[in-house]
Amino acid sequence: MTETRPPDRLPAPDAEPVVRMTGVVRVHGEGTGAVHALRGVSLDVPAGELVAVMGPSGSGKSTLLNLAGGLDRPTEGSVVLEGRELRDLSQRRLAELRRRSAGYVFQDLNLIPSLTVAENVALPRELDGVRTAKARAEATAVLEEVGLADLGDRFPDDLSGGQRQRAAIARALVGRRRLLLADEPTGALDTRGGDEIIQVLRQRADAGAAVLLVTHEPRYAAWADRVVFLKDGQVADSSAAGMETAR
Amino acid sequence: MSVRHGLLALLSRGLRYGYQLRAEFEASTATTWPLNIGQVYTTLSRLERDGLVSRDDQGGQDGQDEQGRVRYAITSEGRDELDRWFAKPVSRADRPRDELVIKLAMAVTTPGVDVAAVIRAQRSATMRSLQELTRALRTLDASTEAAQRLVVDSMIFHAEAEQRWLDHCEAVLARPSEENP
C-alpha cells in the first residue's frame, strides 16, 4: 500500500498482524462471582485475512472481539493493535487508536435515522477532525466500495436490511481503518442480505483489511481464511482453508 | 441413483458417444462425481440390455462409425423410465448409510473413547471442506451453468447441516457430564 500514514501512527510492517492477542484472559467481576470470559486466548489477525470466530453462546466470542478492538481491556495477557500494546496506552490514546484503526459492525447497527447514508458514513471522520468536504469525499469512496454509490443521499429507513448493513460496514471502514470487527453482522438479515454482507467482508479482506467476524452460521464462517472455535473461553480448535495438500 | 438415470437424462437431449456422456455428466455435476469411462460403458450396456437405450446405426458393424465409435440414443422405454425417475421423490432410506453417524453412535457407547475429541476433529474437517466448497463457489463466475452451482450449493448445505448436528451432539453430550462429573 502506498497510502501515507499520519505521522502519529507507527508503521506496521507487513509481517506484523494488524491485531495480535497473546495469552488473553478476561475476568468479569471478582471473588466467587467472577466469570472467566476468556481463559488464555492467543490469536493473530493479519492484513488481508478474514478470521471467523464460532462457538456456543457464552464461549467468549464477543468478549474476544471487544478486546481485539480495544473496546475492553484484558485482565491478563497482551493485545497489540497496529503495533501498539494497548495496555501501555492511556484512555485517551486508546480511544484515539481505536477510532483510527478499528471499525465495528454489529447486528443491531446504529445508523442515525435523521442523517443520510453518506452523512452517517462521514460522521466518524468528522469526529476525527477531518474537514466536512474531505469526510464526504471519503464517505462517497467507501460507499462505492460496498456497492452503495447511488444511495448516499437516502435515509437509512429507505434502505433494505442488507443495504443498511453495508452502509454500517462502510461507516466502519471509512478513513482507511485496517481492522474490521463484525459481531453477528448477518444475524438480522435473510439469506440474500446475509450473502451480500459476507461478500463485502470478504472483499474488504481481499483488499487488505484484517477482518474478525463473530458468527454462529457455518455457511458464513466458511468464507473465512481461518475459523476459530471457542469453547468455555478457550480456543477448542481451528481450521484454515487450503491447508490440505491438493488432491 | 443412478449414473443410469443421469446418462438417460443426457441422452434425452440427443445422440451421444460414450466419451461425450462422461464429459457432460461430470460438467453438470461440477466434477463432484467423477466417472471413469469403464463405468459409462458398463452402464450403457445394461441400459441397452434393458431396452432403454439403443445404438444409432452409422453403417458399420454393431452401429459403429468408420472410426469404430458407437453413438447411443434413448428409446421410448428409456424416456418413460426417465419420466418416472424425475417424478419420484428420493427416499432418505435409499441413500447410503452415513458413516459419521455410525461412528459417533459407536464412540458414545464404546468405553475409553474421547467422544468430544471425535466431534472436534470432525468439526474442523467438515469446516475445512465447507471452506473449500465456498471457495469453489466463489470462483464460479456468473456464466457458469446453473446445474453446477446447484450441485456445489447442495454440498454446502449438507456440510452446514453436519456442522450444526456436530454442535448439537457436543451440547447434548456436555449436559450429563456437568451433572455428574
Image (cartoon, grey):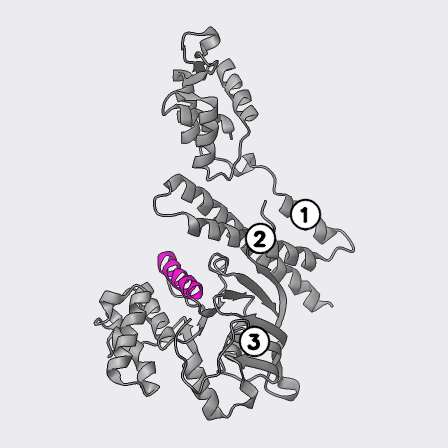
The kind of residue tagged 1 is: Lys
Identify the subunit bearing mark 1. B
Q: Quick check: B49 above or below A71?
A: above
Number of marks drawn: 3
Q: Residue at x 25, y 83 (%)?
A: A132
**The C terminus of chain B: image quadrant:** bottom right
Identify the subunit bearing mark 2. B
Nearer mark to the viewer, of 1 and 3:
3
Q: Residue at x 54, y 69 (%)?
A: A57
Q: Residue at x 41, y 44 (%)?
A: B149
Identify the subunit bearing mark 3. A
Nearer mark to the viewer, of 3 and 2:
3
Residue designated by label 3: A20
Nearer mark to the viewer, of 1 and 2:
2
B49 relative position to A196: left or right: right
Mark 1 crowd level (few <14, some 14–19, many ≥20, 10 Å Cα): few
The kind of residue tagged 2 is: Thr
Q: Quick check: A240 above or below A8?
A: above
Residue designated by label 1: B103
Is A217 a magenta residue?
A: no
A160 relative position to A6: left or right: left
Residue B49: x percent and y percent?
A: 51, 14
Are the residues flagged by discs 3 and 2 from a single subunit?
no
Residue A197, visible in the rendered structure: yes
User: Which disc, if any, is residue B126?
Assistant: 2
Viewer-side residue, A89 vs A47: A47
Is A201 a magenta residue?
A: yes
Element type where label 3 sits in the image: strand
Mark 3 crowd level (few <14, some 14–19, many ≥20, 10 Å Cα): many
Magenta range is A191-207
